[in-house]
Image (tube, grey):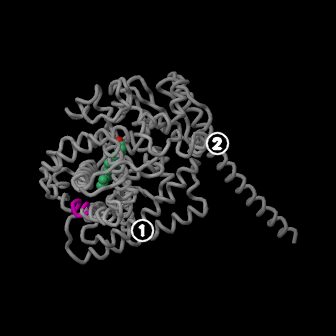
Amino acid sequence: MMMEVAWRLLDRRIVFATAAVVILRLIFRLYNALIAKPRELRRILKEQGITGPHQTFLLGNIREIRKARGASGAPKATPGEKPVHHDCAGTIFPFFEQWRKQYGEMFVFALGNTQIVHVVQSDVVRDITTCTSLDLGKPSYQHKERGALLGQGILTSNGTFWAHQRKILAPELYMEKVKGMVGLVNESTKTLVKSWKSHVEASSSGAAGINIDEHMRSFSGDVISRACFGSSYDKGEEIFVKLRALQEVMSKMVLSTGIPGMRYLPTASNREAWALEKEVRTLILEVVKERKAAAHEKDLLQMVLEGARNSDLSQEATDRFIVDNCKNIYLAGFETTAVSATWCLMLLAANPEWQDRVRQEAIEVCGGCLPDSEMLRKMKQLTMVIHESLRLYSPVPVVSREALKSMKFGDLNVPEGVNLWSLVLVLHTDPEIWGPDSYQFNPERFANGISGACKLPHLYMPFGVGPRVCLGQNLAMVELKILLSQIVCNFSFTLSPKYVHSPALRLVIEPEFGVDLLVKKL
Ligand code: HEM
């Protein structure tokens, strides 16, 4: 009896002792990750003279700033006012402007427990963005926060795994291959032009008011579905509808919190994201299964499939490789292209003289036909407008990297785990680089290409630069050129009085209330 009681007590003591050790280790790890390591990184940076705001800057703060300045962070604009472009960098990132004044060009701040150095000096930006070392990668917090959306695909992965994925995907988006996609982009454009024509015909005044954002998204989604899934296009559409829903759920989550680990909690949005993630995975793998039966044309999915099969991965890892990269291509190529087209059309509507110039050129070059790749090359005025639009409203506002090991750029020692951010919008509108009219819409500056437009061409980076430069930039330019040339050939358009100019930061920089145009058939 005595023995039994002693054993029981001992048992309990062992259980308590084990639990105490586990809890203490957990506390120690949390302390290290949340307090000791960030403090140590700050100390190293401070020794180099890099200081900055001490409060932890969570993405939730963006909402506070928005509340204070109006819904998007942009000053309130009156409907019908001509857009003022100098809004963008300063109003979307007012805190950066304030910190630059307070701490100088290079400063450190925190996003959750991640230390971020803000860098805009041209030589340091060049060294960072062109660095080919695999020790410099994409920030790990992006993967943590957007795991359900991105998985471990090309956008967020690092090291040799990223290099392997890039090697498989890159050749499929080289210019030679993209030339072969002109036909499918023309198909998607025809659908859009037809739908706008019926809108105009249905309006009694001969001018239809169109909120163009959804139209641009349908166009861009249509192109990506065709490029990715080829003849399995119908299934591709279904997958992309679900992915868009997933993206929307995730974008709300990303904006509402910067707290690490939130995505593991069973909140309502997390549960919704997990369910959508599962559905997308099942749908993609169904297409893959169907394909195993028959020889297939070489669309993007097929390349991802073959790349995964030749990679000596387990079945589980192969499936993940395929699903994650399909999701990554969609995310990288869908919203960015749609929002770029939206900004280009807003600028053409606000600047009728440029709309006329682009129209005249498109009519001369295309002669009433759908463009081929040679015609696209000849449309110089249109290319200038697209470059200028991507300069003022670059959809991706920040190019970011993480030092996966301690690294050095010029005099800057970057400790392992520190992130580097270059604000594209600031670099794109710096009067020192672009001249006194840097905030104005002036496509003429690109008459002699990017190197003729500014003093430091490597700082023009709507598609990023260096080894991780956008893989889809050729396709994106082809999409924009075909879409815009066909719109100006078929329609004339002005900004509707409903339009309120308010660039807002969501996953990309987009017009907060959309773009409303008044469209007439030519
Ligand atoms: C106007 C439209 C687009 C813009 C503005 C854009 C912009 C960007 C930017 C800024 C990056 C990050 C570069 C860096 O971190 O240095 C990126 C990466 C990427 N983009 Fe795009 N993109 C566009 C369209 C597309 C399209 C249509 C696709 C695919 C079909 C695509 C695929 C990718 C991929 C796969 C990456 C990751 C590259 C890597 O990490 O190795 N993008 N894009």
- Amino acid at dot 1: Val
Query: In the image shown, does 203 or 360 lie closer to the viewer?
Result: 203
First to last magenta residue range: 184-189
Q: Residues within 10 Å of mark 2 (few under 14, many from 20)?
A: few
Query: In the image shown, does 466 or 427 lie closer to the viewer?
Result: 427
173 w.r.t. 437: above or below: below
Magenta stretch holds residue 150 = no
Taking 399 as reference, is 11 left or right? right
Circle number at residue 31: 2
Q: Is residue 312 visible?
A: no
- Image x and y of residue 320, in percent: 39, 63
Q: Which residue is mark 1?
A: 280
Query: In the image shown, does 502 or 510 lie closer to the viewer?
Result: 502
Q: Residue at x 17, y 45 (%)?
A: 361
Tell how many labels: 2
- Amino acid at dot 2: Tyr
Q: Disc 2 on helix, strand or loop? A: helix
Q: Residue 420, located in which quarter of the rendered image?
A: top left
